Image: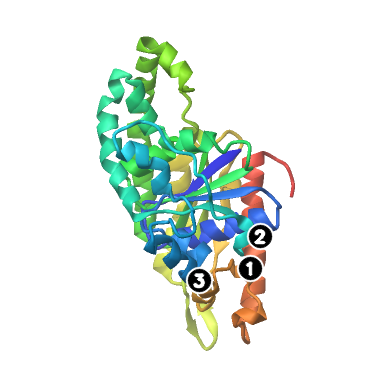
Amino acid sequence: MKTMTFFNNKGGVGKTTLTANIAAYFALKLEKRVLVIDCDPQCNITQLILGDEKTINLYWNDGKQNNVDTIKDCVEPILDGDSNIEKPRKMERGKNNRFGVDLIPGHPQLSLLEDPISRAWTELPAGKPGAIRITRWLGSLIETLNADYDYVFIDVSPSLGSLNRSILINCDYFVSPLSADVFSVLGLRNISQWISLWKKYYTAGIEQGVRLNPEAMERFGIDDTVSITSGFVGYTMQQYIAKRKKGVKRPTKAFERIIQTIPDEVHGRLGEFTPRGLNNTRLHLGDVPNMFSLIPLAQGVSAPVFELKTRDGLVGSQYIQVSNYTDIIGQVSKNLYKNLEGQKDV
């Protein structure tokens, strides 16, 4: 099983929409067993997959009406002062949503996990198993589900806080969605510095734990691997809206300048986190166009863009847009799959 997140320190790059649609493509087109875990306290991907009515029913009664566990239920022991996690008893199943993915819904109170994770982080250099287990909460959760899925997609916020640090530590891979603006590039630079800073700190804590508490480390299955530090497997570019003159697109110099610098920025900032064998060409998974009216339409019917049908309200030129998006998201997904699985063709 492989776990990945789509992550950039810059918001507004289409991260959640991209995550949901690629997860759906893996499930529906590549026929993989896919789980989505919503680790963004804003719960956007939960609402996208479940739709408004199911979302209201879930949260209005704190998940009890449908007997569906959220991510809050999984981390409740940590919020209560323990270092365990709870395996979800019941999840949203792919057969019940149009994305074809299982889902552990998010919860706004996941943000409360920031404090215990921060406290655990300060105790990490002492090698305390409890602190390490709290830091590795997501890894513990994923291990309970290891036999059930081929891929786990994790949606996160743009934050560089303690919650996202703990999530990245427990992921195998990450993809960075970018847009043609300077802050998107600065987001890459922030990620590079951020991972470099906590990598050594975390590794030192694990090594201390192995020295001082080897039996506890073995009992809880804690090892010293940090897969994400060699897990950058690609980026996407969100196309900007070009100006037109007499029906002809006119490139914007400022945007084009940024786009031209992206490959060098990616190599310079994230090259050290890239698996061996992936060059800049393979890291560029594809360009994602602005879908204009299709995104709110897909959100309104809780469906992947490439699955939109006439009954969903498609009209006129939207059919061509769906066809184009299907080709694009298909190629991005296949490129990602090839980077995750080596040279295998799909």
Q: Earlier in the sequence, mark 2 or mark 1?
A: 1
Q: Nearer the viewer, mark 2 or mark 1?
A: 1
Q: Callout 3, which amino acid? A: Gln
Q: Nearer the viewer, mark 2 or mark 3?
A: 3
Q: Earlier in the sequence, mark 3 or mark 1?
A: 3
Q: Residue 64, how many percent across, how many down?
A: 43, 56
Label 3: element kind? helix
Measure the C-alpha gap from mark 2 to mark 1. 9 Å
State the residue position of label 3.
299
Which residue is drawn at the image coordinates 42% and 68% (left, top)? 253
Which residue is drawn at the image coordinates 34% and 43% (left, top)? 163
Count all numbered tags in the image, as a single digit.
Answer: 3
Which residue is drawn at the image coordinates 59% and 69% (left, top)? 305
Residue count near mark 1 (Cα–Cα under 10 Å), binned few <14, some 14–19, many ≥20 = many
In the drawing, what numbered circle is on residue 160?
none
State the residue position of label 2.
330
State the residue position of label 1.
306
Q: Quadrant of the N terminus?
A: top right
Q: Residue 202, how many percent across, how many down?
A: 36, 27
Give 200 or 213, whichever is nearer the viewer: 213
Give the left or right position of residue 205, taking residue 94 as reference: left
Q: In which image quadrant can residue 116 be found?
A: top left
Q: Residue 230, how many percent across, how many down?
A: 50, 34
148 versus 263 height, above or below: above
Q: Callout 1, which amino acid? A: Phe
